[in-house]
Image (tube, helix red, strand yellow):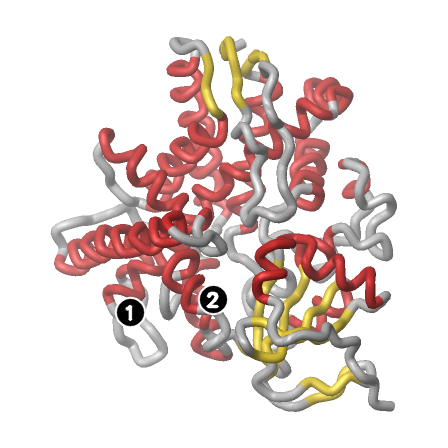
C-alpha cells in the first residue's frame, strides 16, 4: 500500500518554523492527526516526523545520511564545518570513537570533581554581591569546567569573553540580524583560537594532559593515518567546549524546576543518587533544549506505506517526542518518578538525539551533560540558600534555544 504524506500547502514554511520554534512539528502533528507530514523548508521538500518509531527509522544509517544536510547558517554558528555531525559511515564511526574515548569512567570522575570546585568558587564570589543572574554565571562556570576538563589553558581575564563567544555559537543559529552575525563572528574567533592551540600541541610547545580533548583531538589520525586539518581539529575541540557551556541552559531549567516544584526540593534534600538522576532526566525530558534533528534520505525506500525519495530533507521532532502522550503518561506533568521504571529505549527519550552512541549519531556528550547536571543540582539544593525576587520566569517555545526570560535572578546567595 502506498500512502500519501499529509502535506502542508504553500511555497515555503521556513519562517513558520522560526515563528513557532519547538512547536512547529507538534502543531502540525496535531492538525494532521499524523506523526508524519510533508512540507517545504529552505526552498525544498521536507518530511517531518515524530515519535519512537520515527526516531528508530531516522537513526537507521542505511536509510539516512548527514553529509550536506546542515544549512550554512548552522555550520557558520552552531556546528562549524566538517565536524563529526556532518559525517557518515566508517568516517563518522572513526571520528565518533575519538569522542567516545574521552568519556571514560575516570575522565567523568575528573569532570565531577572539576564541576564541584567551580561551583564552590563561584558561590564564594556570589556571597559578595547583592544578586546574580544565574544564566550568565552558569555560562562562565561551564566555560571554566569545559576548558579545564578539555585541557585548554586560558587566562583568568579571558573567561568571560570566551564564555560569551562559545555561548554565541548556540544562541545565534536561528536569530536574525545582529545576533546571528555575532554568532558567525564568534565562530571565527573560537576556531582561530583553538586552531592555534592545536598547532602548538602538534609542534610540541604545548602539552595538555593525556586523555583531554585538546590533546586527543589534536593528535587524532583519520582513516588514512593523517592528522585532521587544523581547522577541522579546532571545530572538534569546540564540539567539546560549546556543548558543555550550553549546559547552562539546563542549569537554568534545573533551578526553575526546584522553584516551581518545592515538594521536589524536599525530596532531593534527603534523596540518594538514584533520585537525583531521575530528576535530572525529567528536567531534560520536560524542558526545551534541541527542537529537532536533521538528516537526508540516502536512497529511495518505503516505510509504513510512505515513499521516501533520495535526497529529501527529513526532520525528527525531539521536543515533541519527549512530550508524546503515546510514550509518556501525562507528558506535560513534571514527574521524575517516571524514570524509575523507564526501560532505557534509545528512541523514546531523545533530548540530545537517539540511537546508538558508538555506531550512530546520538550525542557523545550526553554522559557529560548528566554528570554536570547532577553535580549542579546537588549544589543548588544542598549547598546554597538564595531568594528569587519578583521576575519573569516564563520561557518561550518559540525562541530557540529557550531559557527563562529573566535568566533567573538570585538574591542573597549564601553557602550553607
Q: Is residue 7 left or right of residue 416?
A: right
Location of residue 316 in the rendering, given as x and y in whole percent from the top left corner: 66, 66
Find residue 64 and report its image quarter: bottom right
Q: Is residue 329 left or right of residue 109?
A: right
Q: Is residue 39 left or right of residue 313?
A: right
- Residue 324 seen: yes
Location of residue 170 in the rendering, given as x and y in whole percent from the top left corner: 45, 50
- For residue 63, above or below residue 26: below
The residue that mark 2 highlights is: 85
Report if the CB atoms under discs 2 and 1 are less than 8 Å apart.
no
Observer-nearest residue: 35 or 33? 33
The residue that mark 1 highlights is: 228
Location of residue 333 in the rendering, given as x and y in whole percent from the top left corner: 81, 38
* Residue at image point 46% right, 55% down: 173
Cα distance between the residues tagged 2 and 1: 15 Å
Query: Which element is circle 1 on?
Result: loop
Amino acid at each position: 500500500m502506498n500512502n500519501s504524506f499529509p502535506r502542508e500547502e504553500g511555497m515555503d514554511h521556513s519562517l513558520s518554523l522560526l515563528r513557532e520554534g519547538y512547536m512547529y512539528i507538534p502543531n502540525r502533528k496535531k492538525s494532521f492527526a499524523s506523526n508524519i507530514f510533508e512540507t517545504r523548508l529552505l526552498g525544498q521538500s521536507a518530511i517531518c516526523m515524530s515519535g519512537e518509531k520515527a526516531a528508530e527509522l531516522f537513526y537507521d544509517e542505511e536509510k539516512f545520511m548527514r553529509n550536506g544536510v546542515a544549512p550554512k547558517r548552522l555550520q557558520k554558528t552552531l556546528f562549524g564545518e566538517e565536524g563529526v555531525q556532518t559525517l557518515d559511515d566508517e568516517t563518522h564511526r572513526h571520528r565518533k570513537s575519538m569522542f567516545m574515548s574521552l568519556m571514560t569512567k575516570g575522565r567523568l570522575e575528573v569532570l565531577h570533581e572539576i564541576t564541584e570546585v567551580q561551583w564552590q568558587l563561584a558561590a564564594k564570589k556570589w556571597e559578595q554581591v547583592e544578586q546574580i543572574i544565574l544564566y550568565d554565571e552558569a555560562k562562565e562556570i561551564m566555560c571554566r569546567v569545559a576548558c579545564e576538563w578539555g585541557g585548554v589553558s586560558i587566562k583568568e581575564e579571558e573567561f568571560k569573553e570566551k564564555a560569551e563567544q562559545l555561548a554565541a555559537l548556540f544562541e545565534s543559529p536561528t536569530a536574525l540580524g545582529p545576533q546571528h552575525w555575532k554568532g558567525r563572528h564568534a565562530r571565527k574567533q573560537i576556531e582561530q583560537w583553538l586552531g592555534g592551540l592545536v598547532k602548538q600541541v602538534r609542534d610540541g610547545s604545548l602539552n595538555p594532559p593525556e586523555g583531554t580533548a585538546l590533546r586527543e583531538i589534536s593528535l587524532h589520525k583519520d582513516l588514512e593515518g593523517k592528522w585532521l586539518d587544523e581547522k577541522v581539529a579546532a571545530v572538534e575541540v569546540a564540539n567539546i567546549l560549546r556543548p558543555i557551556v550550553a549546559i547552562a541552559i539546563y542549569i537554568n531549567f534545573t533551578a526553575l524546576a526546584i522553584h516551581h516544584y518545592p515538594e521536589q526540593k524536599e525530596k532531593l534534600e534527603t534523596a540518594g543518587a538514584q533520585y537525583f538522576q531521575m530528576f535530572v532526566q525529567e528536567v531534560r525530558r520536560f524542558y526545551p533544549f534541541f527542537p529537532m534533528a536533521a538528516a537526508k534520505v540516502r536512497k529511495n525506500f518505503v516505510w509504513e506505506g510512505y515513499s521516501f525519495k533520495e535526497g529529501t530533507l527529513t526532520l525528527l521532532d525531539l521536543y515533541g517526542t519527549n512530550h508524546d502522550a503515546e510514550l509518556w503518561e501525562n507528558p506535560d506533568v513534571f514527574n521524575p518518578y517516571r524514570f524509575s521504571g523507564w526501560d532505557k529505549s534509545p528512541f523514546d527519550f531523545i533530548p540530545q538525539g537517539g540511537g546508538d552512541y558508538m555506531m550512530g549519531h546520538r550525542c557523545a556528550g550526553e554522559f557529560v551533560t548528566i554528570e554536570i547536571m547532577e553535580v549542579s543540582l546537588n549544589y543548588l539544593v544542598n549547598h546554597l540558600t538564595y531568594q528569587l525576587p519578583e521576575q519573569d520566569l516564563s520561557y518561550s517555545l518559540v525562541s530557540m534555544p529557550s531559557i527563562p526570560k529573566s535568566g533567573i535572578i538570585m538574591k542573597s546567595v549564601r553557602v550553607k
